[in-house]
Image (cartoon, rainbow, N blue to C red):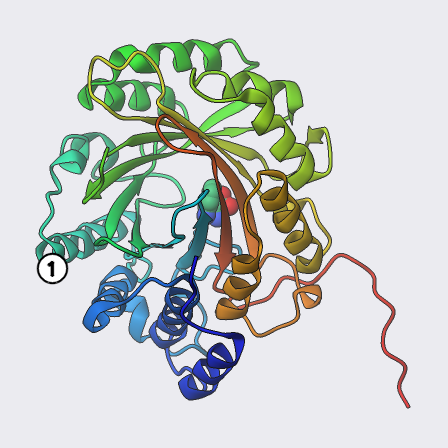
């Protein structure tokens, strides 16, 4: 893989950017540097402009002002988060997740701003919002509940145009009916049959151990657009990992188990929950999930980001993937020393999907508002 920049170029890109005045300039600077280190070209700054759409009214907010809304996209409420995926053999990809409606006064308004951002992007990049419209009445009631209404992501790849994704809330009608909402959504997407096995697996777990967290819909340019259901696993262990990873017949459950051992350094996950993303593509004849991703909230299982970085590097090495890109990506989003905080790497994930080699993704926080304090005690440098 050829990378277009060396570390000195990234240093000068940081210097050239100066001190960002707005949230938009902070996040655009991070995306710009991430594109450089991964070799993703931004033709005529179209990605930068699309990122502005994705940030909605938050883009122009002074960086010194508090977040407009306690966005749960990231721990410090920055309404944006990055991720970098390292596949085997192929070029890396960069994705940015945002909450376009972050500045709205109500959750219903938040959803409307999200739709407005998607319509702009659909016009700019000529894609259809039809997949999301199919479930609009389900996920956007007049008085939605929960912590978010609509999140969007843009995925940037080296040799093709961007892909987009929308995330909606299964708890939009409150936590009680979430399972029925997901059942109905999967039926509308044409995946009633493929969904049945997953639904039975979840129903067999103890009540509340598995909670529906998000439903994701691919929009725009994808080889095989997916519908994804995210399940948060509470009181989880390696046996649970093995079983849920086995729902995707083409994957290797032991690979997921090893990933958790290396990334979490524990056999039990009682902190922040791990999430499974079960993905579906191929239409109504599909008999089960076509992919499984395990998301491990590494920030809750380490004392600081130096440890999170080492876990990420171990996961990559363990899966036979290169590690150099990880450090470049960290240097593109943050200038602080990893040991000086925790949360820069929010999640690590392992994807196993039909027709693709396994891939590892590191999720990187923007930290526009706050850096989490490390939980590791380090000796303070002596004062002279
Ligand atoms: N911040 C939320 C969480 O920690 C949502 C989120 C952001 C998330 N990035 C993610 C969830 C990546 C799973 C994977 O749950």
- The residue positioned 33% from the left and 58% from the top of the image is 102
Q: Identify the image quadrant of residue 145.
A: top left
The reply to whether residue 239 is in sight is yes
19 lies above or below 347:
below
Which x, y percent locates residue 248? Answer: 43, 19
Q: Is residue 44 left or right of residue 12?
A: left
Which x, y percent locates residue 299? Answer: 62, 50
Q: Nearer the viewer, residue 84 or 305?
A: 84
The reply to whether residue 72 is in sight is no
Circle 1 sits in a helix, a strand or a loop, which is it? helix
Q: How many marks?
A: 1
- The residue positioned 30% from the left and 63% from the top of the image is 55
Q: Is residue 250 left or right of residue 42?
A: right
Which x, y percent locates residue 346? Answer: 55, 51
Q: Nearer the viewer, residue 90 or 145?
A: 90
Assign the N terminus to one quadrant of the image.
Answer: bottom left
Q: Which residue is mark 1?
A: 124
Q: Nearer the viewer, residue 264 or 376?
A: 264
Assign the C terminus to one quadrant of the image.
Answer: bottom right
189 lies above or below 359:
above
The residue carrying pointer 1 sits among few (fewer than 14), some (14 to 19) or many (20 or more) residues within 10 Å by Cα, namely few
Which x, y percent locates residue 147? Answer: 40, 44
154 lies above or below 237:
below
Q: Identify the image quadrant of residue 167.
A: top left
Q: Identify the image quadrant of residue 260.
A: top right
- The residue positioned 64% from the left and 26% from the top of the image is 235
CB of residue at label 1: within 8 Å of ligand 1?
no
226 lies above or below 38:
above
- The residue positioned 53% from the left and 55% from the top of the image is 75
């Amino acid at each position: 893989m050829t990378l277009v920049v060396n570390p000195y170029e990234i240093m000068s890109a940081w210097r050239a950017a100066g001190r960002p005045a707005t949230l938009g300039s902070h996040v655009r600077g991070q995306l710009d540097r991430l594109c450089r280190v991964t070799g993703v070209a931004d033709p005529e700054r179209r990605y930068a402009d699309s990122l502005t759409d994705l940030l909605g009214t938050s883009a122009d907010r002074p960086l010194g002002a508090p977040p407009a809304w306690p966005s749960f996209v990231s721990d410090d409420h920055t309404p944006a988060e990055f991720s970098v995926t390292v596949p085997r053999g192929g070029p890396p990809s960069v994705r940015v997740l945002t909450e376009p409606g972050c500045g709205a006064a109500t959750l219903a308004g938040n959803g409307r701003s999200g739709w407005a951002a998607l319509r702009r992007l659909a016009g700019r990049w000529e894609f259809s919002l039809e997949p999301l419209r199919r479930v609009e009445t389900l996920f956007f009631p007049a008085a939605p509940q929960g912590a978010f209404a609509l999140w969007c992501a843009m995925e940037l790849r080296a040799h093709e145009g961007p892909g987009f994704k929308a995330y909606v809330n299964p708890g939009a009608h409150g936590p009680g009916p979430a399972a029925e909402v997901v059942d109905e959504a999967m039926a509308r997407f044409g995946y009633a049959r493929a969904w049945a096995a997953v639904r039975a697996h979840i129903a067999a777990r103890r009540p509340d151990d598995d909670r529906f967290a998000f439903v994701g819909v691919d929009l725009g340019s994808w080889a095989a657009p997916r519908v994804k259901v995210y399940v948060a696993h509470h009181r989880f262990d390696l046996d649970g990992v093995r079983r849920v990873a086995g729902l995707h017949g083409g994957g290797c459950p032991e690979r997921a188990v090893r990933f958790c051992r290396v990334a979490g350094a524990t056999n039990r996950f009682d902190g922040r929950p791990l999430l499974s993303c079960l993905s579906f593509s191929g239409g109504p004849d599909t008999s089960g999930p076509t992919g499984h991703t395990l998301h491990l909230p590494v920030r809750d299982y380490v004392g600081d980001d130096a440890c999170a970085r080492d876990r990420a590097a171990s996961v990559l090495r363990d899966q036979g993937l290169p590690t150099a890109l990880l450090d470049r990506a960290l240097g593109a989003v943050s200038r602080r020393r990893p040991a000086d905080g925790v949360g820069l790497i929010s999640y690590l994930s392992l994807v196993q999907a039909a027709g693709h080699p396994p891939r590892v993704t590191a999720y990187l926080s923007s930290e526009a508002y706050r850096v989490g304090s490390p939980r590791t005690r380090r000796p303070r440098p002596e004062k002279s």
